Image: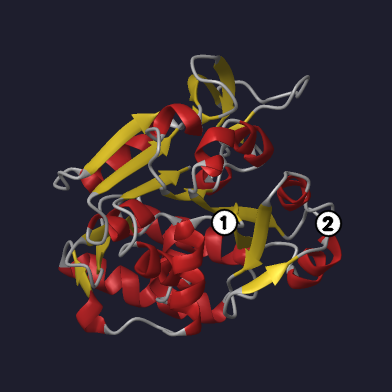
Amino acid sequence: MKPKNAQLSFSSRAARVQYALLMLLYRLAVNRYLFGIFARNLARLFGSDNAVFQNLDSGVRFKIYLDDTYWTRFALFVGNYEPEVDQVLRASAQHTDLFCDLGANKGYWSVRASGLFENVHAVEAASETFKYLCENTRSLNNVTLHKAAIHTHSGEVFTFVNTHNSHASARLASRNEVIPPGSTENVKTLSIDDLVPNNAAALIKLDVEGAEISAINGAMRTLEEGSLLIYEDHGSDQTCGPSAHLLNLPNISLYSIENGLHQLTDISEIQSAKTDRYKGYNFLAARRDSPLLAAIIQDFANP
């Protein structure tokens, strides 16, 4: 649904006008490509400093610059951004004090989780995006930031690709990939097992644009000790790589979360759940005997 005006505040009167025009353009644009063109040209007219603050119900604010076509499209127009993830956060907050936002982007879920969890770790690899993450979490004392790429082992140095006009698609370079000059940077890696303390059952949100399997391989101890993983399996991947990998691990259960909590036991069920090839779908994974998973199941059954 579209957010109520009471949920938003603006950096200036010009930002309020620009926001109104953006919402009109969103209705007129027939696809995301055209909306991106409209939004970027509008930003050139108004300037790059105009922003909207989304006031989250945990008492904190997430800042969205109006030249950002990803967040203006999802967080502002839609309003209720990834409600299935929000429900898992709310249910988990009563049973763990640690949330890890891996591939944190500009910090929406880190900001959201800061009002629910005692400790939040946010990890982002792209330098430019990391600056916005710092800005959004600057006043949040319980959020710890890490500039790194989540991978199997810590301390390695990989090439990271920054995608023009699409910060949400930034990713680790694949082997032998031909990359345009000026769009890469070197980034150090960090494994989930080195991030999450021993014997701490954390809620982990993983969105690392194609590096999910490598990230999961670096989380074996963490999963064994009962942590719960929200991960993305993209609609364009009909092999369902991350889900297939998790299904092959011993004692791991998978669940869809978009329309309630439903256990998935076969890759065909995951393929059927992904109906939009342009969308990333969130799923949940944990050990079958994880106390945190049991608490989530109970909460979904009795909301």
Residue beneath disc 1: 289
- Residue 50, relative to residue 179: is it above or below? below
Q: Nearer the viewer, mark 2 or mark 1?
A: 1
Q: CA distance from mark 2 to mark 1?
A: 29 Å
Residue 166 or 187: which is nearer the viewer? 187
Lower position in the chain sequence, tag 2 or tag 1: 2
Res 33 seen here: no
Q: Amino acid at mark 2?
A: Gln
- The residue sitting at the front extreme is 289
Instruction: Locate the C terminus and report the quarter of the image it occupies.
Output: bottom left
Image coordinates for residue 256, horizontal then vertical, percent: 64, 69
Res 130 seen here: yes
Residue beneath disc 2: 238
Image coordinates for residue 164, horizontal then vertical, percent: 56, 40
Label 1: few (<14), some (14–19) or many (≥20) C-alpha neighbours in 10 Å: some
Q: Which residue is found at the position 58% from the left and 45% from the top?
A: 169
